């Protein structure tokens, strides 16, 4: 079993958050999906079906899917071929016909995936899960940083921007007393400044039983420091926390069924 989420925005957009794997092998302690462990990659049709499911639902409401984001269960670039083939099907003018710029892929920084994406023709949006301003803290909350440290990830992002000339979004989950200090904000600003055509998206942590979210006032102060340093910052609106469908909360209740 997997989970997908439909986000209905006040401005009329409808975004489907899809999964690319059953579970996840990365084991980030702040993410519920990682606690499931890795079961398997999803097939092309299993990925496409998630979008079609919500498209059929929205059709009854005389609405359509506006955007598809690969920010559900799993690491999309560890199932690269199936993810890209699914996007091609959904992008096909003879099929679902959703424009390439309406797709976003979020990765922890799988360098090979970033490199492959930079060689493709589709103008897909790329998001990098940063979540820490230095390798020591990032390794603590994202074990994959041992294989893909910040220097390697940022180098790949720079090359991607040089080839594609599209903005990249850096995602940063705000966790109380862990990565939300003034010092972290200044370090983060210094890091992001090195990357042209990028911006930062702050995400209030959705509780999964391990950490606590940063307080609203702390997030506001953190954002102010970044903006004072010249960083373009957005803040993600929180969807689905009440039904455990928010960012980092996706995990099936019956993990033995696949």
Image (cartoon, grey):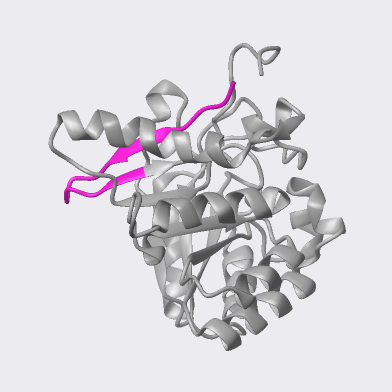
The magenta stretch spans residue 247 = no
Nearest the viewer among 231 and 181 is 231
Magenta span: predominant SS is loop
Count of residue discs: 0
Name which residue lies at 72% across and 79% down.
Answer: 155
Nearest the viewer among 190 and 61 is 61
Name which residue lies at 35% across and 62% down.
Answer: 99
Q: Quadrant of the C terminus?
A: top right
**Residue 210 percent coordinates (x, y):** 66, 29
Name which residue lies at 73% across and 70% down.
Answer: 153
| Up-down relation of residue 201 to residue 203 (above or below) | below
Is 192 on the left-hand or right-hand side of 6?
A: right
| Visible residue check, residue 143 | yes
**Residue 88 percent coordinates (x, y):** 49, 57
| Up-down relation of residue 256 to residue 57 (above or below) | above
The magenta stretch spans residue 5 = yes
Residue located farthest toward the right when viewing the structure as drawn: 146
**Residue 1 percent coordinates (x, y):** 59, 20
Name which residue lies at 66% across and 13% down.
Answer: 257
**Residue 226 percent coordinates (x, y):** 48, 72
Which residues are drawn in magenta? 1-15
């Amino acid at each position: 079993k997997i989970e997908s989420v439909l986000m209905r925005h006040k401005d009329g957009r409808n975004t489907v958050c899809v999964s690319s794997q059953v579970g996840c092998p990365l084991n980030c302690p702040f993410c519920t999906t990682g606690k499931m462990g890795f079961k398997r990659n999803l097939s092309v049709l299993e990925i496409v079906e998630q979008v079609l499911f919500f498209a059929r639902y929205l059709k009854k409401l005389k609405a359509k899917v506006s955007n598809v984001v690969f920010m559900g269960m799993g690491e999309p670039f560890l199932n690269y071929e199936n993810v890209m083939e699914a996007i091609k099907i959904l992008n096909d003018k003879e099929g679902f016909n959703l424009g390439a710029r309406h797709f976003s892929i979020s990765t922890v920084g799988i360098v090979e995936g970033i490199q492959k994406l930079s060689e493709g023709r589709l103008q897909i949006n790329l998001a990098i899960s940063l979540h820490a301003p230095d390798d020591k803290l990032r390794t603590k909350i994202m074990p994959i940083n041992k294989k893909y440290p910040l220097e390697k990830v940022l180098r790949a992002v720079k090359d991607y921007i040089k080839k594609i000339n599209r903005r990249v979004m850096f995602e940063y989950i705000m966790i109380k007393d862990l990565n939300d200090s003034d010092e972290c904000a200044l370090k983060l600003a210094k890091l992001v400044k090195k990357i042209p055509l990028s911006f930062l998206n702050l995400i209030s942590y959705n509780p999964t039983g391990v950490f606590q979210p940063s307080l609203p006032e702390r997030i506001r102060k953190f954002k102010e420091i970044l903006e004072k340093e010249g960083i373009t910052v957005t803040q993600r609106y929180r969807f689905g926390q009440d039904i455990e469908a928010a960012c980092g909360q996706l995990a099936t209740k019956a993990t033995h069924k696949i």
